[in-house]
Amino acid sequence: QVDPLNSDQVSDAILKSDSDLVFAFSWSWRIPSSVVKQKICLCLHPSNLPSYAGGTPIQNQVFDGLYDSKVSVFKMTNKLDYGPIYMQCALSLFGGIEEVFERITSIGRSISEQVISDYVANKLKFKEISTIPEHPEHYSKIRGPADSQLYLNDLKTISFNFLTQKIKILLNPYPNAFISVGDNIIKLKSIKRIKKVKPDYILLSENIEYDVKIETKCVLILEDGYALISDFELLKAQN
């Protein structure tokens, strides 16, 4: 079994194979330059490259309010997420992360079949990208767990639909959206729009201590009304 973090093992396994095409789809590690030079290495990236090259492109696009994206399949070079484009197909980022993954998988499968067909027919062609990412600021930031924190005061400027999309796109396997309430961390799984706050509901506000339990019905104040946290995971904050 090849260790993906061991570039020598990866390089040897590929170079010893009879393959001409290398599909590095859903691959989170760099392909050694020795392989890129000798094989046709193709990478799939869920953005309209060169836009949103880099880490966690799906979440970065959604958090920027961009839902109409593309799946880009390109020939790899020594630069991260940069190379001549084989094909770009429309991709919707609406819905949950699993839905988006299913769309990417379907599109990737279709493009892969076309790649093989074109290669066999000696019709494999690529289009150069004019913009070359040269500096770290040209790449999207890889989102970490801390980037998934939402603040109660900020939620007052966010609509219900936008917050719903943020929560869905940050479901597993990514660090879930969460809020801190006292010494509790509430990982948000889903929310429900409500018109009225019932007497047994807790209306969450910044800088107020709450004794939150798993059965507690917590309500968020949003730009366009109230949202009941209908599904969540409760954790204790690490001191």
Image (cartoon, rainbow, N blue to C red):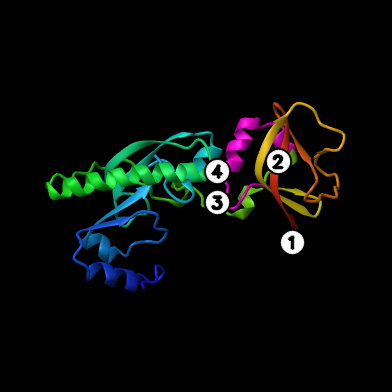
Q: Nearer the viewer, residue 232 or 138?
A: 232
Q: Which mark is residue 169?
A: 4
- Mark 1 touches mark 4? (CB < 8 Å): no
Extreme residue toward the front, this view: 215
Q: Which mark is residue 143?
A: 3
Q: Which mark is residue 238?
A: 1
- Which mark is nearer the camera, 3 or 4? 4
Would residue 28 be found to the left or right of residue 148 on screen? left
Identity, as a three-letter code, of the amino acid under mark 2: Ser
Closer to the N terminus: mark 3 or mark 4? 3
The structure residue drawn at horizontal position 26% and vertical position 64%, both measured from the top left corner, is 35
| Magenta region | 153-178
Q: Nearer the viewer, residue 133 or 119?
A: 119
Q: Which mark is residue 230?
A: 2
Identity, as a three-letter code, of the amino acid under mark 4: Ile
- Which mark is nearer the camera, 1 or 4? 4
For numbered disc 1, what is the local secondary structure? loop
- Which mark is nearer the camera, 2 or 1? 2
Residue 158 appears in view: yes
Closer to the N terminus: mark 3 or mark 2? 3
Closer to the N terminus: mark 1 or mark 4? 4
For numbered disc 2, what is the local secondary structure? strand
Residue at mark 4 to residue at mark 2: CA–CA distance: 17 Å
Q: Is residue 163 above or below residue 41?
A: above
The structure residue drawn at horizontal position 52% and vertical position 37%, both measured from the top left corner, is 95
